[in-house]
Image (cartoon, rainbow, N blue to C red):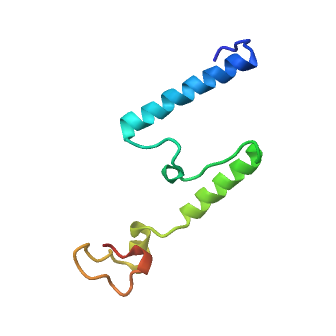
Amino acid sequence: MEKSEIGEKAAEEIVRRTDKARVGYIKAIFGKDWFDLKNYDMVFNAATQSYDQISKIIVDALRAKDQMITPDTWDLLVAGPLPPASGPASSRTPKFMHRR
């Protein structure tokens, strides 16, 4: 990436134009609102958190997710697949894994 010597006002204008283009792209392609926080798994404020703090939060979240039980790992734990989606939920299936 080429470094450019521009003033603060010019840099702010570039950021504004780029953000506006991104907002339009997300709306056009995905039909989503760029500013709706429900569309994000995590949101960070780099003005109040250091990059090291943000990195640690992300790594910790990934490690926690890695430990979650999925249908595949449940099969390994109970030596059998989950009941079919159309059938009743098995009593051996945790409530959070019941299919609807």
Q: Residue at x 70, y 12 (%)?
A: 4
Query: Residue at position x 48%, y 70% from top?
Result: 69
Q: Quadrant of residue 47?
A: top right
User: Percent from the top left, x then y, of residue 98?
Assistant: 36, 76
Q: Quadrant of the N terminus?
A: top right
Seen in the picture, residue 56 relative to 97 is either above or below; the reply is above
Residue 60 placement (x, y as % from top left): 66, 58
Q: Residue at x 60, y 63 (%)?
A: 64
Q: Is residue 24 above or below residue 82?
A: above
Query: Residue most toward the top?
Result: 5
Residue 15 lies, in percent from the top left, at 62, 25
Q: Name the one closer to the observer, 16 or 42.
A: 16
Looking at this rendering, what residue extends furthest in the bottom direction?
91
Residue 91 location in percent, x, y? 36, 87
Q: Is residue 75 left or right of residue 41?
A: left
Name the one closer to the observer, 77 or 41.
41
Of residue 50 and residue 9, the one placed in the foreground of this image is 9
Which quadrant of the view contains residue 8? top right
Q: Quadrant of residue 76?
A: bottom left
Q: Quadrant of the C terminus?
A: bottom left
Q: How many marks on residues?
A: 0
Up the image or down, 14 lies above or below 97; here it is above
Q: Is residue 60 left or right of residue 83?
A: right
> Residue at 52% of width from left, 67% of height from top?
68
**Residue with the most extreme left position:** 86
